[in-house]
Image: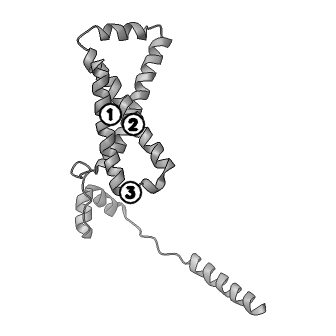
Amino acid sequence: YIMISLRTAHRSLALRQHLTVSRHMTVISSKSAAEYKKQNYTERMEKKGMPVSPHVMIYAFPVVALSSITVRITGVALWGGMAGVAAMSVFGGDPALLAASIGDSSLALPAKFCVSFPLAYHFIGGVRHAYWDATPEAVTNEAVEKASYAVVGGSAILTGVACML
């Protein structure tokens, strides 16, 4: 028992000594800081010999990432639309009259698309995630990619049907 206590005390002391070791801070003069700020990120990385990460605009996003981003964007669009309808109602507008007047105009088809696509895409994306939550063993790279294409195809079909009504 005494031997175990001594080992534990020794380890504890060694751990404390290890954790209290500090490194010296690098002091940057105002001149070197100003020089540092003059360089852009690419120049600083080249000077260090480090590669520069690819920019988002040249990076080819996988279809799964694009599908996930689109689900989020359609959710925000739906929220914005509902907030607009609610604000119109609160401030004395008539959303039903506005919808009827748009439906009778040449803007009917684009308006139907602007409502039906986010609704269809977000709904089908939500069903996909509910399925993944219920069956995590079904989540594989291949299945996720196929499901992303299915969300795009299903929402295109639903949007087309809704626009023709």
Q: Residue furthest bottom?
A: 3
**Quarter in which the N terminus is drawn:** bottom right
- Residue 73 image offset from top left, x and y in percent: 36, 36
19 on left or right of 46? right
Which one is in front, 160 or 71? Answer: 160
Q: Amino acid at mark 2?
A: Ile
Q: Which residue position is annotated with label 3?
A: 140
Q: Secondary structure at mark 2?
A: helix
Q: Earlier in the sequence, mark 2 or mark 3?
A: 2
- Residue 138 image offset from top left, x and y in percent: 43, 54
Q: Amino acid at mark 3?
A: Thr
Query: Does the rendering let one see residue 119?
Result: yes
Look at 30% across and 56% down and name the residue there. Answer: 37
Q: Which residue position is annotated with label 1?
A: 155
Look at 29% across and 31% down and name the residue there. Answer: 157
**Quarter in which the C terminus is drawn:** top left
| C-alpha distance separating marks 1 and 3 | 22 Å
